[in-house]
């Protein structure tokens, strides 16, 4: 609640602060951009008359009330209509997608999956003016250096003649085009796919698809290997092994009794693989490969990377998940903060109680689960919060705090 009132106070003062400070900031920025070679015509077209966009500030500072479960996340994104539309578009643009796949090695179903998840196949490109949004974020202070660099790159894109300033629209945070490239990503990876001498990620599908595939290839895409597959661990599986950091040869996983759903063999890949459980041990279990890491370079969300794999699989005609969900319900941000605080007070170092289940929190959860003989999956389930609250209450009543145990971590298994 205090955070809510603090946000209201900040937003209330934002217009007055913007009126007194933004114009001075913008004048200094224009001088910097001009010194870096950006033309006066581009600066006039992109920056004249712009003001801070209050809605962009609100979106940048919002905090989710609940952390969405994986099943809810997937259900909202890999829908029957999105799968069907992806199949239609893959057939409609087969020649283009085949050419892109031949050049870059990225399967057309994977590329269509990115397209579907990023902009619903071009239906939602975003309506925020990119220079105005980036100027707002660069001025406002939170990650200002990052957005200042993005604004300079956006101006360079305009200066190169790829798009007019008035047409450079996208998300509130600066992502744009069919594949939602940030300006720095555009400048590093975007391609002229249709050969017209300019790169138009908004109107030219060849430019957008070649650019997306070029990014993935240069990020390390391994042709012929999957992103992720659903697997079934054996009875009695040690869930401590289910960690994105515990990467073993596929042969090692086979020896441990892990099988692909349906009973077939695991893919024969050159690299190592990990087991992830995005909704805890009761939910779907995935084996992820080197290409999963490539997708994570695009978007650092495990749920997003698994959604890419699932949408691609279904667009290509494959089945959906055999296990649809894990434990029902998701913790709110406040509940996650309470869980983190309780773990800290019990001696399990979860880090700052910020409501974000990062690596330190997951490790603390695993240590707690190990000590209390629970499945060690690192997942902040509602039932786990109830268990921790009971333990914390008992420890408080007894006037003692339990130290964290020595945690035998099979992630150190080399597989050799």
Image (tube, rainbow, N blue to C red):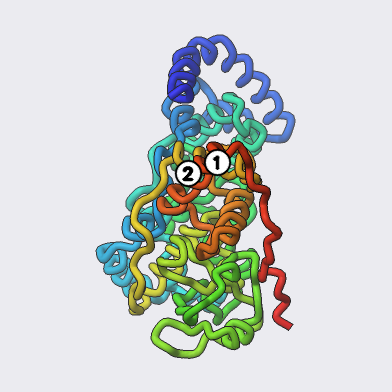
**Residue at the image position 61 percent from the left and 21 percent from the top:** 26
The outermost residue toward the bottom is 264
Above or below, comparing residue 64 to residue 201 in the picture: above
Q: Which residue is mark 1?
A: 342
**Image point 60% across, 30% down: which residue?**
142
Residue at horizontal 44%, vertical 60%? 279
Task: Place residue 116 in its image quadrant.
Answer: bottom left
Point out the image quarter for the C terminus: bottom right
Front one among 188 and 395: 395
Residue underneath mark 2: 389
Point out residue 88 in the picture as x, y percentages from the top left corner: 29, 70
In depth, the one of 222 and 133 nearer the eye is 222
**In the image, residue 144 lies at what x, y percent?**
63, 31
Q: Few, some or many C-alpha atoms within 10 Å of disc 2 (few <14, some 14-19, many ≥20)? A: some
Which badge, 1 or 2, is on the more N-terminal residue? 1
Q: Secondary structure at mark 2?
A: helix
Query: Taking the image as drawn, is residue 160 in sight?
Result: no
Label 1 SS? helix
Between marks 1 and 2, how big is the CA–CA gap? 7 Å
**Mark 2 and mark 1 in contact (Cβ < 8 Å)?**
yes
- x then y, percent, for residue 235: 47, 80
- In this picture, is 196 found above or below 356? below
Position of the N terminus, as image quadrant, is top left
């Amino acid at each position: 609640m205090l955070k809510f009132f603090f946000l209201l106070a900040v937003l209330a003062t934002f217009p007055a602060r913007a009126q007194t400070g933004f114009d001075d900031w913008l004048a200094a920025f224009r001088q910097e951009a001009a010194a870096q070679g950006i033309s006066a015509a581009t600066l006039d077209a992109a920056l004249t008359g712009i003001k801070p966009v209050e809605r962009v500030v609100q979106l940048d500072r919002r905090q989710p009330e609940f952390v969405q479960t994986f099943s809810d996340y997937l259900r909202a994104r890999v829908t029957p209509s999105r799968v069907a539309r992806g199949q239609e578009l893959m057939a409609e643009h087969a020649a283009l997608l085949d050419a892109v796949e031949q050049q870059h090695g990225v399967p057309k179903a994977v590329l269509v999956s990115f397209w579907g998840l990023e902009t619903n196949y071009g239906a939602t490109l975003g309506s925020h003016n990119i220079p105005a949004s980036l100027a707002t974020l660069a001025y406002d202070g939170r990650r200002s250096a990052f957005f200042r660099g993005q604004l300079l790159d956006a101006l360079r894109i305009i200066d190169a003649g790829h798009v007019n300033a008035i047409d450079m629209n996208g998300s509130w945070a600066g992502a744009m085009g069919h594949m939602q490239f940030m300006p720095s990503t555009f400048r590093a990876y975007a391609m002229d796919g249709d050969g017209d001498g300019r790169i138009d990620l908004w109107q030219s599908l060849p430019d957008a698809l070649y650019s997306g595939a070029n990014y993935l290839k240069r990020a390390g895409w391994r042709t012929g290997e999957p992103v992720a597959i659903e697997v079934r661990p054996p009875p009695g599986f040690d869930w401590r092994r289910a960690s994105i950091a515990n990467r073993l040869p596929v042969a090692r996983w086979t020896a441990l009794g892990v099988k692909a759903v349906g009973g077939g063999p695991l893919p024969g890949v050159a690299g190592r693989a990990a087991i992830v459980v995005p909704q805890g041990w009761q939910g779907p279990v995935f084996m992820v490969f080197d290409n999963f890491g490539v997708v994570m370079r695009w978007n650092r969300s495990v749920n997003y990377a698994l959604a890419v794999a699932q949408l691609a699989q279904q667009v290509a005609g494959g089945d959906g998940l055999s296990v649809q969900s894990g434990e029902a319900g998701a913790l709110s941000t406040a509940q996650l903060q309470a869980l983190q605080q309780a773990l800290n007070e019990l001696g399990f170092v979860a880090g700052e109680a910020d409501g974000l289940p990062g690596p330190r929190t997951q490790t603390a959860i695993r240590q707690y689960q190990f000590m209390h003989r629970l499945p060690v999956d690192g997942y902040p389930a509602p039932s786990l919060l109830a268990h921790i609250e009971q333990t914390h209450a008992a420890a408080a009543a007894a006037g003692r705090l339990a130290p964290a145990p020595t945690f035998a971590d099979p992630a150190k298994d080399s597989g050799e």
